Image: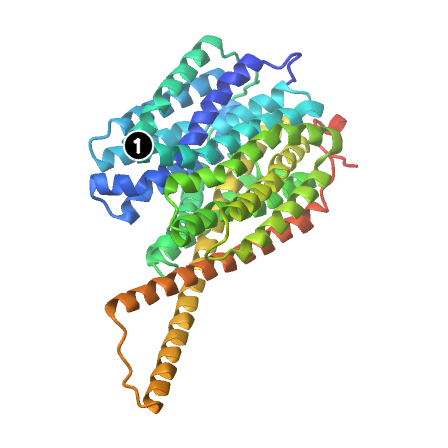
Amino acid sequence: MSNQQKPPYGMIAILFVGAFVSFLNNTLMNVALPTIMTDFDVTYSQVQWLSTGYMLVSGVLIPASAFFVVRFKNRHLFIAAMSIFTIGTIIAAAAPNFSVLIAGRMVQAAGSAAMSPLLMNVMLVSFPAEKRGSAMGIFGLVMIAAPAIGPTLSGYIVEHHSWRMLFEMIIPFAVLSLLFGIWKLKNVMDTRKVSLDYLSLVFSTIGFGGLLYGFSSAGDKGWSDPLVYGTITIGAIALIIFIFKQLRMEEPLLDLRIYKYPMFALASIISAVVSVAMFSGMILTPAYVQQVRGISPFHAGLMMLPGAIVMAFMSPITGKLFDKFGPRILAFIGLTITTVATYFLTKLEVDSSYTYIITVYTVRMFGMSMVMMPIMTNGLNSLPMLKNPHGTAINNTVQQVSGAIGTAILVTVMNNHIKSSATELAAEAKAKAVKAAKKAAEAGITPSSPTAEQLAKLKAQITQTALLDGINYTFMVATIISAVALVLSIFLKRVRVQNINKPEMEQK
């Protein structure tokens, strides 16, 4: 593979639109779930499959994306992926019942899974290594902006229109992207005949699918549910078999031998840790804003929008800074800001001001914008060009799996702390009531029993305080996770550009 003399900007723009609508679609559903639940008369655990199922299909197909990128021409791959995504969107928009809606989402996910690896590989081939930071920064803008505006946009649409509009508005963009792809897309990547090892695909599907499903279900069902620990165990065993199989194969489905490149391995570990920290903010902040403060989903989304805008705006700037200064200084500053801002989120009160919430969340997002793309780009720069499809596939898989695992663990930590805090607060309230009754009896006053209204008010107060305690405690865990990534960033080294295509890597 060789770098193009001039990057194909028109083609990259088409790929960007395709990637944007598929990324946007990933987070549009979350706010709409309660409405869909009512419309189709399904339970929360059933409706959750609209998000979990989408993530599962993506997580299962992404490891195979390295094979697709190497085997098929990028034009054909984009047209096939965008066609599948468009068909899935149309099915979901017209779904007469919940089963068809689920099927539509699964088809969407099957098309969407190839978008990110395809776009990333085209950009790695199209730009010289010294310009990759800037290019990947623009890619970061799409990757970050689309999921970030999803909840706000979804909140507005669900409040004013039918949830079907979430799919209907994507159809024209998907169709236009597909038509432009057929008309303008050219092949810029070399392909070679590689065979697909079906057994590897089976173990990859069971392994990643089992882990993603198990950890995603843990927050709702609890860790003691046989389905949760059963799928995690089966997934872990299948994944171990998959790893050993890949290391022994000449043409593996996912070339895990690239972990011998130290900067790629370090980048992979840091991005996994940062993914967990990032997901913590995406879960805990809406939980605080909506459940503790009682703010509507749309306004909750609006409060998080400045952070999303800052992150999207910073992504191209971070890319240029990476080209100039390398990854270590950016990652260190970014993770310092992220860790400090996350610590400030452990100090949330029942009446914390909107200004405080928005400012701290936005500063945290600013810190994160300096981390993900530089680390990922530096890791990919350390690989020989032929290994790029495997590098991007591994990066995307690691982010999906670590995000799911991190989310499940943080939700469990939060729920456990909420329960113990509620028990303590209830015991304190009971002790106070007993003490007050004793004092009244000593004074010769007959203590009056609390009314139903007073009991309901006390229960709501205990619930609110316990939830706040749980959120603050979990943000403290997220602070420690961010601090771990901060320490790891000290060991980052900039990869020498002139050595990126050599089998062995040198660093300065």
Position of 324 relative to 199 (above/below): above
The residue sitting at 67% across, 31% down in the picture is 381
The quarter of the rendered structure image containing the N terminus is top right
Position of 451 relative to 260 (above/below): below
In the displayed orientation, state which residue is furthest to the right: 508
Element class at badge 1: helix
The residue sitting at 34% across, 29% down in the picture is 166
Q: Is residue 202 visible?
A: no
Q: Which residue occupies the foreground of this view, 124 or 177?
A: 177
x, y percent for residue 502? 72, 28
Q: Is residue 406 visible?
A: yes
Residues packed near mark 1 inside 10 Å, few (<14), some (14 to 19) or many (20 plus): few
The quarter of the rendered structure image containing the C terminus is top right
x, y percent for residue 424? 42, 72
- Mark 1 lies on residue: 160
| Relative to 434, 134 lies left or right | right
Q: How many marks?
A: 1
x, y percent for residue 195? 48, 27
The residue sitting at 50% across, 20% down in the picture is 15
| Relative to 210, 357 lies left or right | right
In the displayed orientation, state which residue is furthest to the top: 183
Q: Which residue occupies the foreground of this view, 430 or 230?
A: 430
Q: Quadrant of residue 5?
A: top right
Q: How is the image coloured?
A: rainbow
Q: Quadrant of residue 465?
A: bottom left
Position of 451 relative to 105 (above/below): below
Position of 109 relative to 221 (above/below): above
Q: Which residue occupies the foreground of this view, 232 or 494?
A: 494
Amino acid type of disc 1? His
x, y percent for residue 466? 42, 63
Q: Which residue occupies the foreground of this view, 340 or 10?
A: 340
